[in-house]
Amino acid sequence: MTAPASPPHPAPTGEIVIRTMAMPADANANGDIFGGWLLSQMDLGGGILARGTAHCRVTTVAIDGMTFLRPVNVGDIVTCYAHLLGIGHTSMKIRVEAWVQRFTDRPQLHVTEGTWTYVAIDPSGKPQAVKRGATTPESTPPEK
Ligand SMILES: CC(C)(COP(=O)(O)OP(=O)(O)OC[C@H]1O[C@@H](n2cnc3c(N)ncnc32)[C@H](O)[C@@H]1OP(=O)(O)O)[C@@H](O)C(=O)NCCC(=O)NCCS
């Protein structure tokens, strides 16, 4: 008789867009990391995916379904994962998850997630249609 299979460990969804370390300066009076710091990391990470998708400047217009699942500790390695949920005319919905590596010999912990909406904007800050499939310096291999 074989032992019952253990449930699969939950894994992050999406591509890595930010990896950083939570520092003492980012902590609140309880010694945990400020939610606002984490939110700004996730906003930056989602914005990187949005800019790479739209091939132009983007701005955040909305954040939905933000859930703080566990506290982040000073010294945690924080990784933000992002994946595109959908593209509208000028907007993009991107799911961003934050995971932390607390102990080097244990799996990452899922700490926060939310859905960001970014809007592609022109140089004057007005919405513009998302240009799909264009080649940009970011998606072009570096010159040798
Ligand atoms: C984002 C901004 C350029 C949009 O300008 P706007 O004149 O409101 O543009 P629109 O009403 O045409 O909306 C543009 C897109 O955003 C979407 N959108 C607007 N408000 C939204 C909201 N609250 N939630 C989700 N999507 C929203 C619209 O549905 C539209 O999407 P689509 O083109 O794919 O159909 C403008 O609101 C802005 O500059 N906001 C401030 C952004 C900012 O400073 N962000 C940083 C926060 S610190």
Image (cartoon, rainbow, N blue to C red):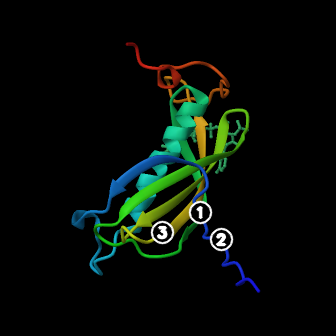
Quick check: marks 1 and 2 in contact, CB under 8 Å? yes
Q: Secondary structure at mark 1?
A: loop
List the residue tagged with mark 2.
8
Q: Is residue 2 left or right of residue 115?
A: right
Q: Does the beta carbon of the residue at mark 1 sit less than 8 Å from ligand 1?
A: no
Quick one: SS at disc 3? loop
Q: Residue furthest top?
A: 144
Count the marks: 3
**Residue with the most extreme left position:** 25
Mark number for residue 11?
1
Amino acid type shown at disc 1? Ala
Location of the C terminus (image quadrant): top left
User: Which residue is rendered at x = 52% and y = 68% of the image?
Assistant: 110
For ligand 1, give the image quadrant: top right
Q: Report which residue position mark 3 lands on.
A: 107
Q: CA distance from mark 3 to mark 2?
A: 12 Å
Q: Residue at x 52, y 66 (%)?
A: 112
Give whichever of 59, 107 is nearer the camera. 107
Q: Position of residue 76 (x, y in %)?
A: 34, 66
